[in-house]
Image (cartoon, rainbow, N blue to C red):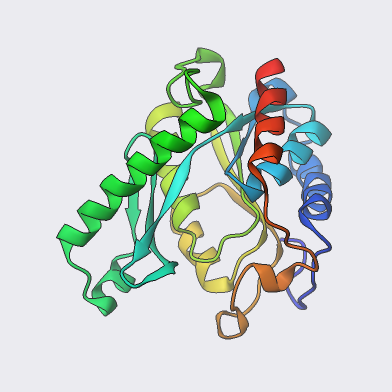
Amino acid sequence: MIFGKFQLKIKNRESAGNILSETLKDILKKDNRKDIVVVGLPRGGLIIAEIIATKLSCRLELMFVRRLRAPQNEELAIGAVTEDGTAYLNEQTIQILGISRDYINNEISHQLEEMRHQVRKYIGEKKTFLESKDPNIKNKIMIIVDDGAATGSTIISVVRSLRKNMNPRRLIVSVPISPKGTLKLLRDEAIDHIEVITRPQDSSFGSIEQYYRNFNQITDSQVLDIIHRIIMN
């Protein structure tokens, strides 16, 4: 944990990547860089992940994941699903809102279809990280990177998918911002280490964006540029 007793506004995603990479260097100083894989989550997480992978001189991969949306409130995540169908559901939120299983099943199917379109747009016919079955990316130290963890849904679904498919030696989560309640949820997933810049109280947390001075939308062009560099490497 970098800062806990006070809150700060991070300049932008690039600044977050630089801060996190410096602390991760210290945590991983005894580990061989060939044993480390940085897993970036689109869109914003990929910007930060590329900086971390470059600073650590290790492999960068992209993993596809989609939030599951609450009825009549697309901004509220009730869970998430990865490209292989690994889903995490926030049962407490689902119960409070009285969301039916039919709605959840339909939402999972919809997001998987949306993810298939996203995969084709970003990597075409190439195999995804999970599909590749590359033995060189199994049993590694994996660092999951996003530009923030509001509910933790996307990260938890990714953690579960990586455990199922990649048998990681260690799992590290690296995010600039996450409220304290979400950090507890992530720790309950038996993640080996969580690196976070600022951890607001749940009562003061409104959105990830409020903790950045600049939180510009990431364009398809930016994502495609990073994916091209991943493929070239």
From the top left corner, tell me how far across and down residue 129 is, in percent: 51, 26
Depicted 11 relative to depicted 145: above or below: below
Q: Report the label total.
A: 0
Q: Front-most of 26 and 135?
A: 135
From the top left corner, tell me how far across and down residue 69 is, in percent: 37, 62
Q: What residue lies at 56% left-to-right and 85% top-to-bottom?
A: 203
Tell me if 163 is positioned left or right of 213 in this view.
left
Q: Is residue 190 visible?
A: no
Depicted 129 relative to depicted 198: above or below: above
Q: Is residue 3 visible?
A: yes
The quadrant the C terminus occupies is top right
From the top left corner, tell me how far across and down residue 159 is, in percent: 46, 44
Q: Front-most of 117 and 8?
A: 117
Tell me if 217 is positioned left or right of 70 in this view.
right
Image-quadrant location for residue 222: top right
Q: Residue furthest top?
A: 135
Q: What residue lies at 57% left-to-right and 72% top-to-bottom?
A: 180
The quadrant the N terminus occupies is bottom right
Image-quadrant location for residue 225: top right
Q: What residue lies at 56% left-to-right and 37% top-to-bottom?
A: 170
From the top left corner, tell me how far across and down residue 199 is, in percent: 66, 70
Q: Front-most of 102 and 17?
A: 102
Depicted 162 relative to depicted 74: above or below: above
Depicted 211 relative to depicted 166: above or below: below
